[in-house]
Amino acid sequence: MLLCLFCVVFRQGDIWTSWYAVLSGSLDVKVSETANHQVNQDAVTICTLGIDTALGESILDNTPRHTTIVSRETSELLRIEQREFKSLWEKYRQCMAGLLAPPYGAMETGSNNDNKDSLGSDPLNFMNNILNKVPSEKLQRGGKVMRNAILSRAPHMIRDRKYHLKTYRCLQCCVGTELVEWLVQQSTCVHTRSHAVGMWQVLLEEGVLNHVDQELGFQDKYLFYRFLDDEEEHTPLPSEEEKRESEEELPDTILFLTQMGPDALLRMILRKPPGQRTGDDLEIIYDELLHVKALSHLSNTVKRELASVLVFESHAKVGTVLFNQGEEGTSWYIIQKGSVNVVIYGKGVVCTLHEGDDFGKLALVTDSPRAASIVLREDNCHFLRVDKEDFNRILRDVEANTVRLKEHEQAVLVLEKSPRASSLGNIRYTVLSGTPEKILDHFLETMRMDTHHSDPNPAVDDFVLMHCVFMPNSQFCQLLMAHYHAVAPPGSEQERLEYAVTCKRRVLNLALRWAAVHTHHLQEEPAALIFLEELYGSVSNDSRILRALKDFVPDLEKVVKLHSEEAKVKKKVLTQFSNGDEKLVKTQPIRNCDDILLKVYCSDHTYTTIRVAVAATGSEVTSAVANKLASNDDLLLVHLSSAGEKQMLKPNDVSVFSSLSINGRMFACPRDQLNALTPLPDQEGPSAGSMSSFELMSSKDLAYQMTLYDWELFSCVHEHELLYHTFGRQSFRRTTANLDLFLRRFNQVQLWVVTEVCLCGQLSKRVQLLKKFIKIAAHCREFKNLNSFFAIIMGMSNPAVSRLAQTWEKLPSKFKKFYAEFESMMDPSRNHRAYRLTVTKIEPPIIPFMPLLLKDMTFSHEGNKTFIDNMVNFEKMRVIANTIRAVRHCRSQPFNPEVCQPNKNHAEVRGYVRKLCVIDKQRTLTTFSYRLEPRRT
């Protein structure tokens, strides 16, 4: 059928009689708020349909069209009459889902009818593809490589099978459990059996691997699967040449599948009807929901409820309308992949929503019509969908399980009934929000008396770790002491005695947990030390009468003595660690009360050295400089980078020295000299590489000494520094110097790799350097030093290094494969799932990839309010505490220095790795890179 320019195919409100596919040209899809049949009045164009798109799905139920279709240019359409199309639909319903817009197709849900993949997303190839799915070329090759590798390494896995006395004739089959077991053994990139299931699911979705009964979900069970090449009878075995090629390609194929596997596994789970999802399935979905931006404000209980009802929905073509303005709201959507346009009648596209955003919830909450239309902005979009019935049930369940305690008509504590009862059969409650005082009261009242203060108690530990965000130590100590001396309510003497003992034991239990978490930070707070001494005195006296308190006396005495002695330790004077000539040897944590010798430069490159507290603010530093220089000018404090970038430091910025970049320097000058500031010559970094110094050092020794130093820095980071970094250290007047030094080390190692490569003028030497760095990275991973491991790999992926094509071409294939495997662990997709899976398989001690942990905490902080209705959002505290607990887990076992026996030159290696000289100016590194290998014309 041929259409001329601006020809109306059909109008809004018409009943269609045919289905169409666009062969050439393009069509505009228009919507009118008044359903006016005059196209040029108030109609709004919501999208354009091009070649390979289809329209006309409403012929299946004779419903009126919601849109008007007008040709934008001379166009050709393929037309199928309603009767013939309905016949095809009844016969190939599951295969045609990709051709149709909802509610007929183009989606994959958890229902049995929709449990098939779309096979015909291209209308022009529909007749060819409706019965046979054509896999992508890369995955088809990947399936062949996997089959050939199995036939080469474990040929017994592919053979004729009998099951319940039945022989599957259609050639040779594999068993699901054997495929999973084999894949796990082939590579360390395959982290778990479920990860392997996801990888096989990728091939199953593409039709490269098939279940003998055409089921669409791969299972780690005694079920039979067949490779596509084995579908034909008498398929020849691979030749020796094919086997050799497959062996060479196998690592890359496995690496490719490991990256796609987690998504495929999640899709497979979400396609299952909710009632068929296992406990492991729900945990995988729940873990995914923890990192969805649109759900960050919901409690973990609600996320677990959502995990059991979420449905996967996908749409293949740009321009697909999910729903129209004015329609009844039936579902809430979360974008998992892709983007959509929000269209309002008369206004057109008002905004675009991307991955992590949600839409459609308002109509469910208010029970009102849709306020806008949602149109796909790109092909192949994936959504998580919650239907109205499930949405309302979850809201009802949440409200039914929520208890609000009020005082003077104001809520002071909000609790949620836990889905799991306590070991005693009693109902347990989780704190959602409350005033600081009421949250403390709750944890004291519900604390079990049969637990020791060193026993794990996640709920109480969360409070002890996070209370500094909403309740300073001075207030906490005062309230605890009041609870210790609480007056018993009226009753018999025995009842009053039991009440007093219970209150005191609970306070002592909590106080000892608190002291264990805060460690040396308590020495910097006089109120905390006074509280501990008073509490110890009270317990010592009370224990003479109340024998139940005697067990606490030795533990409390040990805590008081420890902090009293350490408080008397003379403060340290540190050398500024941001200068090139500093000592990087550091064995003790930097404390708030320590002093630092700080070099501050003037515009003429002269400097003055001042001694200030580690936690000194910007105004205190400028005041000290002005006094030292006898200057009456109003000075500005400036961080000047090696690239000449100026960052004005604020007067209330805390611990300003620790925020300097690697080659950054601190300047103080009047405002009229600000533009005259220039970097110092030594900020440029080295002019020659140090390969001659470390090329003879063992890669293992280098990795070992790097790990020793990284562990030393990591061990000095206090858990509360993570909180100060996340919530802003200005709010606490606390330093994060130990954390800053650890993060600075990551950047330093990364830039060390780039600097050495870019300063190496000889091609063969650069190839040796890449090999050296890959070996060092491998040993860092062996030593469970993931921080330096990632720093090295990120350095090698820096554009100044990755663009050196001649150098990479000379790198042996073995090292290329190692690097590709290491790089896959850095894959940021699915919120760095590859890294997270790797960490779960490693036992402590571990030096983690700290930037990612800080990103998790920042995500939780910025996505959730700290206070809700004047109450502490304790659900937010709990989420952040879980991340800090991951850091605690990494340090739960001591690092064993004997893991590697150092060589005779260990002192030389130790000195080298602790004083790396680098160029931190990307433009300079890029310039050197182009000198080594000019751009090819």
Image (cartoon, grey):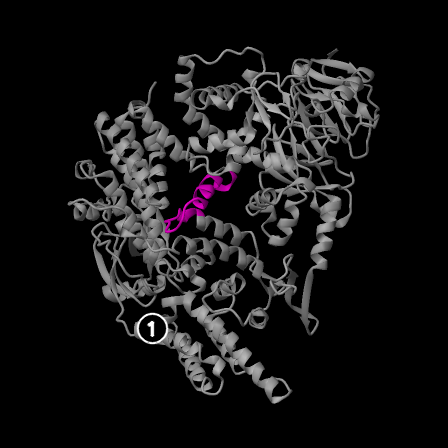
Whether residue 206 is visible to the viewer of this picture, yes or no, is no
Which is more toward the observer, 218 or 178?
A: 178
* 368 versus 230 height, above or below: below
Q: Position of residue 92 (x, y in %)?
A: 73, 20
Q: Is mark 1 on a helix, strand or loop?
A: helix
> Which residue is drawn at the image coordinates 39% and 30% (left, top)?
820
Q: Label 1: which residue?
A: 562
Q: Which amino acid type is marked by label 1?
A: Leu
> In the rendered view of the protein, which quadrant contains the C terminus?
top left
Q: Where is residue 48 in the image (x, y as percent from the top left)?
A: 67, 24
> Does the magenta portion include 180?
no
> In the rendered view of the protein, which quadrant contains the N terminus?
top right
Q: Please indicate whether residue 6 sits to the left or right of residue 640 in the image.
A: right
Quadrant of the image occupied by residue 219:
top right
- Residue lying farthest to the bottom in this orientation: 493
Q: Where is residue 804 in the image (x, y as percent from the top left)?
A: 31, 27
* 430 versus 438 height, above or below: above
